[in-house]
Image: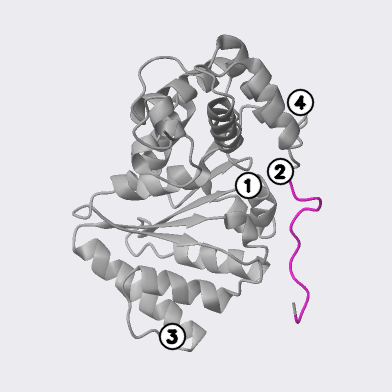
Amino acid sequence: MNYLQHYGLKEVPFSTALDDKFYFNSHEHAQSLIKLRYAVEERKGLAVLVGDLGTGKTTLARKMLDSLEESLFEAALLVVIHPAVTAQWLLRKVALQLGIENTSSDRVSLASQICHRLIEIDESGRKAVVLIDEAQMLRNKEVMEEFRGLLNVEPEGQKLLTLVLFGLVEVDACLALYKPLQQCVAVRCTLHAFSEKTTEEYIAYRLKVAGRERALFTPEAIAAVHRYAGGIPRLTNIICDNAVLDGFLQKQEIINDQIVHGVAADLNLAVGEPPDHHTKNPPTEPKSGD
């Protein structure tokens, strides 16, 4: 018997892998989606969602992408994986995401291709939307200037592109590298850590989706999970995943706070001292040659 059978589960409830069926629509997540949806529907130009590591930004970005109907939107999600992003790279990626196949190697010509594509999308009755995840990686003033240029495409006084940036709070410092763009932020949302009550609801929800209706964690165990995780969903998953496994190994029918304390010790977690989720220095424009 494995631990899934032991606890009456059909699948692993606390995996950190993205899985839409485990999406927990907290009040804050729901409100953020409504605001971001408003930004794209009304063509506000630039919207930003920030939050600490593990608060669900990437999950929300993918949820939003899935919610944008193909008949109404030409939408794409771009994930930035390296801080050494150039304006040329950005323009080419945006062009590809918008369906431009033969992208020009010349930056000015590439920008022109994007403008023409945006007009085509608009004339088809759809709205162009580019979601950018891990936007705190964009630490380059030139990139911010290109964003501003793309948002200036409004031939009849209406913006043809909406950019939605998802990232750590350092995104604000990236935008500050180019004040004209910073002043274009029309909608801004912040994801905060869960309250203890929301943590309880989150744990119960994931267990239910995985096949267990009955409570598996004692109230004291849930309180301990919340304290060690600091209300961060990803860390909550990690602690709960380990606690369920340890509970099975100890042949326990329910997860108590002692099991959670043991897991926290194994993970080197202290109450009120989650891992440092912030970079030490604010973004700066890369020096020549970086």
- Picture coordinates of residue 165 (x, y %)? 52, 52
51 horizontally vs 130: left or right: right
Q: Which color scheme did the rendering employ for the protein?
A: one colour
Q: Which residue is farthest right? A: 280
- For label 1, the residue is 168
The range drawn in magenta is 278-289
Q: Of the residues under marks 4 and 3, which one precedes in the sequence?
A: 3
Distance between mark 3 and mark 2 Cα atoms = 40 Å
Q: Of the residues under marks 3 and 2, which one precedes in the sequence?
A: 3
What's the mark number on residue 277?
2
Distance between mark 4 and mark 1 Cα atoms = 20 Å
Given this view, does label 4 or label 3 mark the residue nearer the observer?
Answer: 4
Residue 215 can be seen, yes or no: yes
Given this view, does label 4 or label 1 mark the residue nearer the observer?
Answer: 4
Given this view, does label 4 or label 2 mark the residue nearer the observer?
Answer: 4
Q: Amino acid at mark 3?
A: Ser
Distance between mark 4 and mark 2 Cα atoms = 13 Å
Secondary structure of the residue carrying numbered label 1:
loop
Distance between mark 4 and mark 3 Cα atoms = 52 Å
Determine contact: label 1, label 2, CB under 8 Å. Answer: yes
- For label 3, the residue is 109
Q: Amino acid at mark 4?
A: Gly
